[in-house]
Amino acid sequence: MPAPSAAPRAALLSAFGCYVIWGFMPLLFMGQAAIGFDSLEILAHRALWAVAVASLLVVLARQGGQVRAVFANPKTLGWLALSTLLIGVNWGLYVWATTHEATLEASLGYYINPLLNMVVGLWLFREKIDRWGWVAIGLAAIGVLVQAIALGRPPWISLVLAVSFASYAVIRKRVPIDAQAGLLVECLLLVPFGLAWVLWLQHTGAGVAFDSPVNTIWAIANGPATVIPLALFAWSARRLPLSTLGFIQFLAPTLQFAVGVWAGEALTPLRIVSFVFIWGGAGVFAAAAFFRHRAEREAPKQPVAPV
């Protein structure tokens, strides 16, 4: 019989695993770009091969009934079609950014995302933001402004990535379907576009995915790289406090930032200043979540009055 701490430890490892994979994901796309893949071909293969892995997970989780039910419910299918559009934009822009020397700007988007989620929660779900939450949001806003000055334009890649993923999360929060089943539906909706683009590339001779076995392996790798971290996240999110995930989630953009620096992307003093503000906001967010959870855990339980 496993020790009581076994499940939390496994969930913690699962959370770290998903964020580490997301953090190093740019290396996969950079590797493909180096052998001739363009961002649209990468995105097409990401949609195609993710279907196979997502289908396997749905079969193992016995969630096939949920998938069939979605296609029998036009309203639910419509919401998932919208989430598919948002995640398609998110995936496509992220692939483009990491293959066009904009990984640093992309990482900024995923630092902003949890802070944007707080604003969305206030706006749509009437959730409360304490003073430390507003401090975190304020620091992030300053960081975005400084980044815009450093770039000479708004950091549109960061903002679109953050807004598209936050909007995607809102829809998936409202749609009554498990993570794996919902992801499979989204991949199935993306498949016609991915397949059409791959066939067009092969017809015109512009595709590189099937030029060699090595290229094909690179293309297939997009499937597990897309689905596995999402499955790990879904599993760990049900077993870990949100404050714990609040700390760990900043691992991914930190690793992405490191990959961008390693790849030689421009890191000017002004851009460093902008990231200092963003890191400050992320730190305040994570610390506030931790102390809030600890206070709730240590608060004395109210005795139940006798009936």
Image: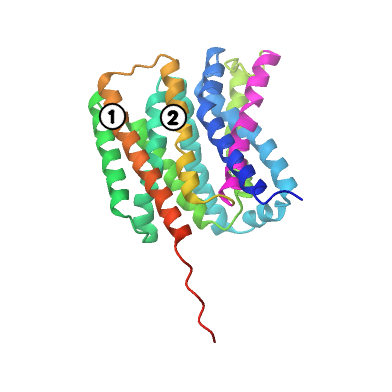
Residue indicated by mark 2 = 254
Instruction: Count every numbered label the image shows and give the total.
Output: 2
Q: Which residue is drawn at 38% across and 44% down?
A: 287
Query: Up-down: is 265 above or below 80?
Result: above
Q: Does the magenta stretch include residue 69?
A: no
Tag 1: amino acid: Ser
Q: Can residue 152 be seen in this view?
A: no
* Side (left or right) of 116 relative to 222: left
Residue indicated by mark 1 = 274
* Side (left or right) of 156 relative to 94: left
Q: Which contiguous range is marked in magenta?
A: 212-238
Query: Up-down: is 251 above or below 218?
Result: below
Q: Residue at x 42, y 41 (%)?
A: 164
Percent x, y for residue 61? 71, 49
Percent x, y for residue 37? 55, 18
Q: Which residue is drawn at 41% across and 30% down?
A: 107
Please identify the quadrant where the C terminus is shown: bottom right
Percent x, y for residue 228? 63, 36
Q: Quadrant of residue 11?
A: top right
Is the magenta region chiefly helix, strand or loop? helix
Q: Is residue 113 visible?
A: yes
- Real-space CA distance between mark 1 and mark 2, rounded to the nearest whole angstrom: 14 Å
- SS type, badge 1: helix
* Side (left or right) of 288 relative to 206: left
- Near mark 1 (Cα within 10 A), the count class, few <14, some 14-19 or many ≥20, is many
